[in-house]
Image (cartoon, helix red, strand yellow):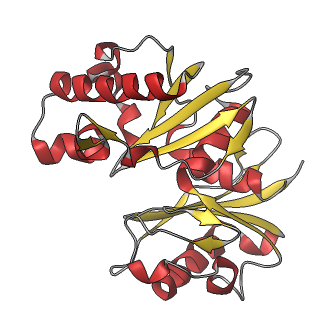
Amino acid sequence: MTVALGVDVGGTGIKAALVDTATGELLSERFRRDTPQPATPEGVRDAVESVCADAGLDKIDRMGIAVPGIVRRGVMLSAANLDQSWIGRELDQVFKGFAGEHVAFLNDADAAGVAETEFGSAHGVDGLAIVITLGTGIGGAFLHDGVLVPNCELGHLQVDGRVAEHFASARAREVLGLSWTDWAAGVSRYLQHLEFLFSPEVIVIGGGITQDPELWFDDLECNTPLRLATLSKNAGIVGAALTATR
């Protein structure tokens, strides 16, 4: 059994747990800290160190950290829901001192995609699986024959002249005061656009919104098979931990 620590950094909360990377099961409680405001690199680093100590940092030598932004060669290139001072920072320098040598960094939606491909609703898909997360914004991950194509910013696609996450994210439903039916119609239009552009074999839908699928899932309209994510709120943690072992 290979154990790694998975960390999921979000705009409102930072979560961590020990993970059995052979099964995807959490081996510890899921610990959480509020994301500091402003969410500067230094403030987030301190919160991550604290939550990792709770989760059992002293018990492992591998960890993965998922962040809400583009990560290329260990450098943060965007900072969705974090302070803009993250942009251009080398993540191994931000987390230097407690993360150890065996640490991996990746986008949070990519982490969810990795987890769903290994243990969840995208497992065993031949060809292209798209995993999207509907939350404060929209995250997206491409998995082709189970291999991640990183940093696909699918929430920023424009559909009918509008940025997708401005009408199809979970937050957009609340901000715009949409009924579940009207919101599902917008999500359907977004899914149809993904289908037209990429012709995926399956689209997996995750994020906090999946806790109440009976309110909206059956109203979605798309020719591509749709599946609810399996790992739900733990997907980012599991995917980050798994990436740290590869």
> From the viewer's perspective, is 123 left or right of 153?
right
Residue 30 lies, in percent from the top left, at 57, 55
> From the viewer's perspective, is 158 left or right of 97?
left
The residue located at (38%, 22%) in the rendering is: 192
Whether residue 225 can be seen here? yes
Residue 166 lies, in percent from the top left, at 24, 46
> From the viewer's perspective, is 188 left or right of 8?
left
Whether residue 207 can be seen here? no
The residue located at (48%, 50%) in the rendering is: 153
Q: Residue furthest left?
A: 177
Front-most of residues 150 and 18: 150
> From what the image shows, is residue 203 above or below residue 35?
above
Quadrant of the rendered image containing residue 215: top left
> From what the image shows, is residue 80 above or below residue 146?
below
The residue located at (39%, 42%) in the rendering is: 208
Front-most of residues 178 and 51: 178
Residue 172 lies, in percent from the top left, at 22, 45
Front-most of residues 97 and 145: 145
